Amino acid sequence: MNSFKPGLEGVVAFQTEIAEPDREGGALRYRGVDIEELVGEVPYEKVWGLLVDENLEPGMPDPEAYEPVSLTGNAPADLQAETARLSAVWGLKKLVDIDAEQARDDLARLSAQMMSIVAKSAAVHDGRQPAPDDVVAQGQTAAEKFLLRWRGEADPKQVQAIDTYWICTAEHGLNASTFTARITASTGADCGAAMSAAVGALSGPLHGGAPARVLPMLNEVASTGDPESYVRDLLSRHGRIMGFGHRVYRAEDPRSRVLKRTAKELGSPRIEVAEALEEAALAALRELKPDYVIATNVEFYSAVVLDVAEVPPDLTPAMFACARVAGWAAHIIEEKRTGRLIRPSAQYIGPTSRALSAV
Ligand code: COA
């Protein structure tokens, strides 16, 4: 029997107690708690605690003092490189040589520091010095401190936009980056290696990079005022409409619902064009694939919400990484507690035995 599944779709690789989206899309729950209950009620750093410790307290700590060696301003690349370096700088021990409590503490340090690295890289990108620690310390929440470190100021609406985005995207079951984190953890590598590997997997547009491609779409539709033609043209070139479709959900993504509401509450200037494009895209995709539900995914309104916080499109994959440190950390600990070295098989379909001279 050939059990090969391209993209491992539907293959159950782990059991998890953290979160797993339900296919019909009704809700997303972290350790059983609906994200609708979390947004606006507790800040992101407490959601980190819920996911990692199954307890809101103490949550994710503040980052300790640390100066990254050389930031380029390309945030995903800076984050991946600097996170890997932290293993050496902090002398993190291999997961096989530490207990789960030590792994949790390493991941807490790393998570906080990863947010700080992204904020500093974003400042470098803007040609600015990151704000000093005493300015950052005036912030109340991780989102506020992130903006202070990046820009030296934090507008409350922008803080709410980032906090909501981070909470909605903190964890989503076994996607590509989380799988990568677990694979790396399963080898007994240290937590910095597992987290930096996950950042690399997240940087592709089919996973974490889609919001970066949503804003240019919105700009183009705003300039022509004709979403139907935009969508028709794109699909006739076999292009993909970014922010639509999902490997798991066959209904509206619950995160999209929360983010759309937030974009409206925060008075996003792009909400009208986004809704017009969403309507045109859903109609065209229904026509194109009548038997395959392609709905709005998290990335579409993420782009609109992050735009409220004036996050430039090329920073969005790193913003996603900031959010997902919680999910990765929780999965790395779960892998350590329950996992086994991950080593799947491939079905060999290459040439049969032959002499070197035949090559
Ligand atoms: N725009 C246009 N066509 C799409 C589409 C989209 N956003 N999403 C899926 N399709 C089409 C594919 O072209 C494919 O058509 P084909 O069979 O004629 O080749 C069909 O639907 C199935 O696509 P497939 O990639 O197998 O479906 P999937 O459910 O595994 O895809 C994604 C999931 C996310 C990779 C896909 O929907 C996509 O590329 N979306 C755009 C990128 C994006 O928003 N990514 C962020 C995800 S959170």
Image (cartoon, grey):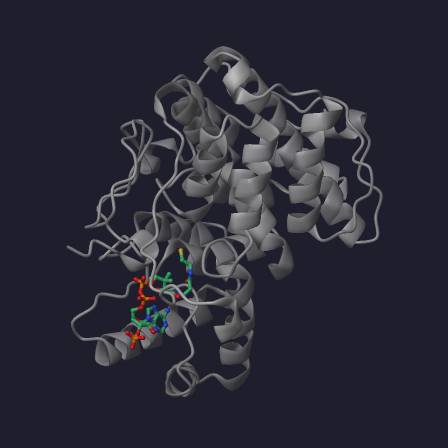
- Which image quarter has ligand 1? bottom left
Describe residue 22's horizontal placement relative to residue 55 as left or right.
Answer: left
- Looking at the rendering, which quadrant does residue 53 occupy? top left
Position of residue 127 measured from the top left corner of the image (x, y, whole percent): 84, 53
Position of residue 173 measured from the top left corner of the image (x, y, whole percent): 35, 40
Position of residue 295 measured from the top left corner of the image (x, y, whole percent): 29, 63
Q: Is residue 42 visible?
A: no
Query: What residue sits 80% from the left and 25% below the top?
Result: 134
**Quadrant, the N terminus:** bottom left
Q: Is residue 179 visible?
A: yes
Describe residue 48's horizontal placement relative to residue 92 as left or right.
Answer: left
Describe residue 323's horizontal placement relative to residue 330 as left or right.
Answer: right
* Of 52 and 138, the residue lying toward us: 52
Query: What residue sits 18% from the left and 75% below the top?
Result: 290
Above or below 212: residue 281:
below
Above or below 246: residue 254:
above
* Of 298 and 76, the residue lying toward us: 76
Above or below 164: residue 212:
below
Position of residue 150 measured from the top left corner of the image (x, y, whole percent): 73, 42
Query: What residue sits 68% from the left and 50% below the top?
Result: 77
Above or below 202: residue 193:
above
Q: How many marks?
A: 0
* Of 138 and 130, the residue lying toward us: 130
